Image: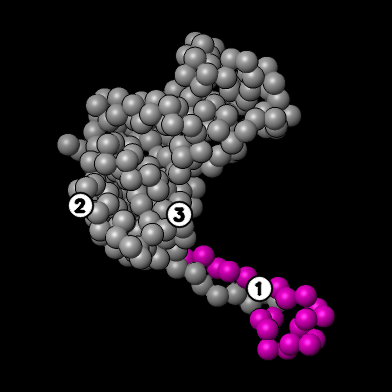
Amino acid sequence: MTTAVELKNIIKDFNVFYEAPALIKNILPFLKTPGSYEKLRALNDISMKLEHGKCYAIIGRNGGGKSTLLQLIAGITKETSGEKIVSGKISTLLELCSGFHPELTGKENIFLNGSLLGLSKKRLNEKFDEILHFSELNKFIDSKVKIYSSGMFMRLGFSIAVQAEFDIFLCDEIIAVGDHEFRKKCYKKILEFKNMGKCIVFATHDPSAVESVADHVFWLDKGCIKAQGAPAEIMDEYLNPGNV
């Protein structure tokens, strides 16, 4: 199989800025001064090779670096040091309401969100019924999305994202907000893409999803790869008391 993504010794730092209220600074002068900051290392020496035709799960506690890793692969954020090589087009589903306008209807947002993913109006017209059918939002498609629940946003976002032309699909923990039956539907679609030779990378806290869908698991902890390997083996270690 060919390589879809290769990361070599990736480091990602963020600057955390401080601004204390004037009154507090007068009382407690030892506090950080305006404009001062410290570096937060979100990813530390990350190396991995992801192949087309395989599905990868990223697990770990909140704040472990999962979202930052997906954003870096997607090109939303840039590494501080190291090397990233991506071979193929990427489609993402990383933030729940990203690409949606609350004052537009679901139908209007299909065209807005789809255009942001690089889908033409012609393709969106051709795929509209398929998007609607997969999302199961027929009753609400002409309503403004500001009334949508988080699960409805996930349904619509996933249904649009999988219509993009891509070789690599990146998905954050968003699927978890859907109901059980729709999650099963999403993971079935992910397996279809894997069988088509696409590379799938998803972050999750769902052990059953990892063991049923993923070929390989990366466990991130404090920005580092703590362990990686076969799903059953890594999940057994991860789910030991004290790890989650």
Residue 130 image point, x, y percent? 47, 14
What's the amino acid at mark 3?
Thr
Residue 164: where, in percent of width, then height?
Answer: 44, 26
- Disc 1: CA contacts within 10 A as few (<14), some (14-19) or many (>=20): some
Q: Which residue is farthest right?
A: 23
Q: Which residue is drawn at the image coordinates 33% and 39% (left, top)?
A: 209
The residue under the point 52% across, 28% down is: 155
Between disc 3 and disc 1, whose residue precedes? 1
Disc 1 element:
loop
Q: Is residue 112 visible?
A: yes
Q: Quadrant of the C terminus?
A: bottom left
The residue that disc 3 covers is: 68
Disc 3/disc 1 C-alpha distance (Å): 21 Å
Question: Looking at the image, which residue sits at the far front?
Answer: 241
Q: Quadrant of residue 2?
A: top left
Q: Give yes or no for contact between labels 2 and 1 (Cβ–Cβ under 8 Å).
A: no
User: Which residue is labeled 1 in the image?
Assistant: 18
- Name the secondary structure under disc 2: helix
The picture places residue 138, in percent across and down from the top left corner, at 59, 15
The correct choice, above or below, for 55 with respect to 24 in the image is above
Q: Between disc 3 and disc 2, whose residue precedes?
A: 3
Would you name the residue on which mark 2 appears?
A: 233
The quarter of the picture where the N terminus appears is: top left
Name the spot of residue 238 as percent of width and height, x first. Answer: 30, 57
- Real-space CA distance between mark 3 and mark 2, rounded to the nearest whole angstrom: 25 Å
Identify the amino acid type marked 2.
Answer: Glu
Q: Quadrant of residue 92?
A: top left
What colour scheme has been applied to the protein in the rendered image? one colour
Marks 3 and 1 in Cβ contact (< 8 Å) = no
110 or 236, nearer to the observer: 236
Span colored in magenta: 12-33
